[in-house]
Image (cartoon, rainbow, N blue to C red):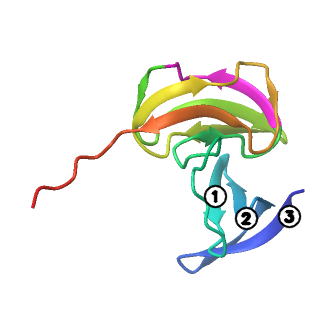
Amino acid sequence: MNHRYLLEVNGQSRWVDGQWLQGQLWIHLNGETFIVESETKNFGQGKGGKAKSDIVAPMPGKVTKVLAQDGAKVAEGQVLIVMEAMKMEYSLKAEQAGTVQKVDCKVGDQVVLGKILVKVNPDVKPEASK
């Protein structure tokens, strides 16, 4: 269930739509979704869990474009999925660079909130030499 929240950023206030899912607040603003995790829970990837790099449905809706392919390299901020929900279009972007492990949706799919749409294996950053 969506709720309205008053969000203040850099001294400016604005009303946004959002909902809580498993200890995370999903905020929908200008066609993008932002996820805020609760500090009271520890969310590891865990077996079968969602990794930070995975692309998940921010709300129930319909997949309108699939721009990711299994095995493809992706850049941070690259749009991987476009979906439509509540008469708005949402571009779901890679949170970090990596390789697409699995695309688990297709154009026309009706998806539920929190469904993993694309699993991305993040690039491993080399450790700085001492």
Q: Residue furthest bottom?
A: 11
Instruction: Please count the marks in the image.
Output: 3
Can you give x and y, in whole percent of width and height, for residue 8 in the image?
63, 76
Q: Does the CB distance between marks 3 and 1 fall below 8 Å? A: no
Q: Relative to residue 44, is residue 53 depicted above or below?
A: above
User: Residue at 68% across / 55% down in the picture?
Assistant: 29
Q: Which residues are magenta?
A: 61-70
Which numbered mark, 3 or 1, is in the foreground of this view? 1
Instruction: Give the spatial CA distance, label 3 vs label 1.
Output: 15 Å
The three-letter amino acid code for the residue at tag 3 is His
Image position of 84 (left or right of 33): right
Can you identify the residue that label 1 sits on? 35
Q: Amino acid at mark 1?
A: Ile
Q: Quadrant of residue 73?
A: top left
The earlier-in-sequence mark between 1 and 2 is 2
The residue tagged 3 is 3
- Work out how far the residue at label 1 is from the one at label 2, CA to CA, in angstroms: 10 Å
In the image, is residue 67 part of the stretch drawn in magenta? Answer: yes
For the N terminus, give its image quadrant: bottom right
For mark 2, what is the residue?
23
**Which of these two is toward me, 8 or 81?**
81
Q: Residue at x 72, y 46 (%)?
A: 58
Frontmost residue, 69 versus 86: 69
Q: Residues within 10 Å of mark 3 (few under 14, many from 20)?
A: few
Q: Is residue 119 above or below residue 103?
A: below
Outermost residue toward the front in this view: 47
Question: Which of the 4 quarters of the picture holds residue 106?
Answer: top right
Q: Secondary structure at mark 2?
A: loop
